[in-house]
Amino acid sequence: MANSSLWLALMIGNSRLHWAYFTGDTLIHAWDTDYLPADVIQRLSQSQTLKDLLLEILPNDEATGKKSPHSLSSSPPPMILASVVPSQTALWQSYPNVRILTLDQVPIKGIYPTLGIDRALALLGAGQNWGFPILVIDAGTALTFTGADANQHLVGGAILPGLGLQLATLAGKTAQLPTVELPQQLPHRYALNTPEAIQSGVIYTLVAGIKDFIEAWWRDFPQGNVVMTGGDRTLLVNYMRSPLKAPKGASQFPEIVDSLNIEANLIFWGMQKTLKNYE
């Protein structure tokens, strides 16, 4: 993209659309929306101005605020799209000037064919900002760990159900267990009612798993950085930072939390770097 040109980035995730717009290399704004119906996508494809488009996709009337670069374009800008949901990808084919990124375009070595492009792009974005070796923890619908060594070669990773998916699975696949919301604070480990017992089981085991993966990463790569991203990143960091709900009130994992880098926009930085490789 030209240094002054405006472009949209769209990452189609497992449960939401992740958006950003850039002016050249500068990320102006990022936000999330639910999936859009086909008729709305068709309307976006026919938008006459950038303002019309942003009014459709920016939440909470942000399209009328300071962050909307209406004066920079008189027509819908180019869109760079990456996706892990093929059926959703197909809906966006009608958008004018759309470019779909594929896994083979991401400049990480040793990528296997079924690696999610969201994981590859986040890994690249993290490495560009914090250097390699790098481990990315993406706390989304699925919670994933993805690492690369100092030569930008994929080390590998792991996938497990995220916080919300674990709670939803217990409620949906059992006869007696209720639907439970995620608490904002770390719950008591030993609960005296069923909802809090579910919260405890899911949260403590997941947080312990994150701690184990980070410690294993630092044993293998003592100089490696760790970055957390994804929709549940803030909640998980709060859990890890909270004092234990126990008589002594010991801290949870302060040494790990203090070493974590937190960044919401890794995938978009990865998109930008991939594009620059092909300019």
Image (cartoon, rainbow, N blue to C red):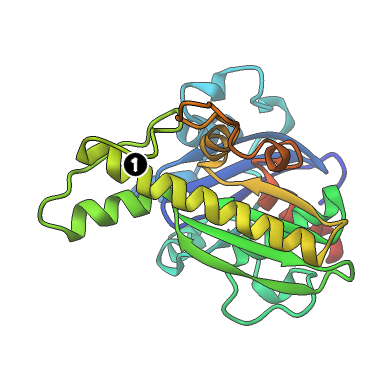
Q: Nearer the viewer, residue 189 or 55?
A: 189
Residue 271, quarter of picture: bottom right
Quick one: quadrant of the C terminus?
Answer: bottom right
Q: Residues within 10 Å of mark 1 (few under 14, many from 20)?
A: many
Q: Is residue 111 left or right of residue 203?
A: right
One can see residue 104 in this view: yes
Task: Name the amino acid type tagged 1.
Answer: Gln
Using the image, determine if residue 107 lies above or below residue 34. below
Using the image, determine if residue 23 lies above or below residue 122. above
Image position, residue 110 (x, y; %): 75, 80
One can see residue 279 in this view: no
Farthest residue, direction front: 248
The residue to which callout 1 is attached is 199
Instruction: Identify the residue at horizontal 80%, vertical 69% (top origin).
Output: 107
Instruction: Identify the residue at horizontal 76%, vertical 41% (top origin).
Output: 259
Image position, residue 224 (x, y; %): 83, 57
